[in-house]
Image (cartoon, rainbow, N blue to C red):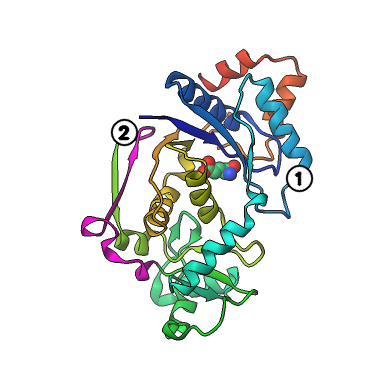
């Protein structure tokens, strides 16, 4: 089986040890399999992406000794593809417009009869306020309203996408098994996720699924923090008729207090280690590779 993987950072801050681990692991795996390592710049959030961070990504990865196939895919070049897919899903009646803000959602989800708000991979599970208000979606006369977020109505996804309504993906990282789940699990544990954010016309979940397919990714190597989100990705792959890659979710690199590293952990930025005279071999050792 061929092996094509990718590293997909967002240019919103410096790469830190956690990113280095993810990129080097994916690169090592591709090399071991005689496969390909690709790069993708995830810059749909134009309010936070900066060209200087993108340049720093290339510099840091090159310094770490990684090489990748050109051209690099940039999400900001693919907005039309995302928009076309959203439009198609809208006319196919898989989406509904949502005008709720965070406060409305938190308030509705915490209503006394509901108990404590439930959390899914995207935060508070959406209580369905606008889905119910849009119940007559059969009569959609207009294109999607530009000032609304568009959510996926998970219950409208055909139950028989796969045999018996069961979805699955192969995991080779934190778990080495076939991970299976149902549409009903997603309704309960994830809720109707936003596929098109009001400010960007797409979302992380939609873009990542379309891009992995467009880049021919056969193996996704990424942090364990995205394990639950993978179930959303597999549902979208089925709905959009895209191949489901093998997933390898790896352990997370933590700071001395055991907390996951964040973009603001500048102290562990690759560029800082480099400035302080560390070598790529030191970085490998630090992350346990
Ligand atoms: N862009 C995401 C991040 O920087 C990674 C997405 C992915 O690997 O699927 O966390």
Work out whether residue 208 or residue 251 is closer to the camera in this orientation and state it.
208
Mark linked to residue 50: 1
Q: Count the marks.
A: 2
Residue in the image at 42% along x and 64% along y: 191
Q: Between 43 and 111, which is closer to the camera in this rendering?
A: 43
* Marks 1 and 2, the one that precedes in the sequence: 1
Q: In the displayed structure, does residue 244 sit left or right of residue 44?
A: left
The image position of residue 194, as x and y in percent, is 52, 64
Residues under labels 1 and 2: Cα distance? Answer: 37 Å
Q: Secondary structure at mark 2?
A: loop
The picture quadrant for ligand 1 comes to: top right
The answer to whether any part of residue 12 appears in the image is: yes
What's drawn in magenta, residue-wise? 154-175
Give the vertical position of 120 relative to 43 (above or below). below
Q: Position of residue 5 (x, y in %)?
A: 49, 33
Crowding at dot 2, Cα within 10 Å, few <14 / some 14-19 / many 20+, comes out as few
Q: Which residue is painted at 56% across and 33% down in the image?
A: 38
The mark found on residue 176 in the picture is 2
Q: Say if mark 1 contacts mark 2, CB within 8 Å.
A: no
Q: Is residue 106 visible?
A: no
**SS of the residue under disc 1:** loop
Query: In this image, 256 relative to 224: left or right?
Result: right
The residue at label 1 has a CB less than 8 Å from ligand 1: no
Closer to us: 215 or 66: 215
Asked if residue 244 is positioned above or below residue 188 in the image, the reply reads above
Q: Residue furthest left?
A: 164
Point out the frontmost of discs 1 and 2: 1
């Amino acid at each position: 089986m061929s092996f094509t993987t990718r590293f997909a950072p967002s240019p919103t801050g410096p790469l830190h040890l956690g990113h280095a681990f993810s990129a080097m692991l994916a690169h090592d795996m591709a090399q071991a399999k005689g496969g390909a390592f690709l790069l993708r710049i995830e810059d749909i959030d134009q309010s936070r992406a900066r060209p200087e961070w993108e340049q720093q990504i290339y510099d840091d990865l090159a310094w770490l000794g990684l090489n990748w196939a050109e051209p690099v895919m940039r999400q900001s070049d693919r907005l039309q593809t995302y928009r076309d897919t959203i439009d198609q899903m809208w006319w196919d009646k898989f989406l509904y417009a949502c005008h709720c803000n965070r406060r409305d959602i938190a308030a509705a989800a915490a209503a006394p009869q509901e108990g404590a708000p439930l959390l899914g991979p995207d935060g508070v599970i959406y209580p369905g306020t606008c889905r119910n208000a849009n119940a007559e979606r059969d009569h959609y006369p207009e294109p999607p309203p530009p000032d609304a977020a568009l959510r996926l109505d998970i219950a409208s996804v055909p139950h028989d996408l796969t045999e018996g309504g069961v979805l699955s993906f192969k995991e080779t990282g934190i778990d080495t098994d076939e991970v299976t789940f149902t549409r009903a699990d997603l309704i309960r544990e994830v809720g109707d996720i936003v596929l098109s954010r009001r400010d960007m016309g797409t979302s992380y979940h939609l873009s990542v699924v379309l891009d992995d397919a467009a880049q021919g990714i056969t193996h996704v190597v990424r942090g364990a923090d995205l394990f639950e989100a993978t179930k959303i990705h597999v549902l979208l792959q089925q709905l959009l008729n895209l191949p489901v890659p093998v997933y390898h979710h790896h352990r997370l690199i933590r700071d001395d207090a055991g907390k996951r590293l964040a973009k603001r952990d500048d102290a562990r930025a690759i560029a800082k280690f480099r400035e302080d005279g560390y070598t790529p071999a030191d970085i490998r050792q630090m992350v346990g590779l």
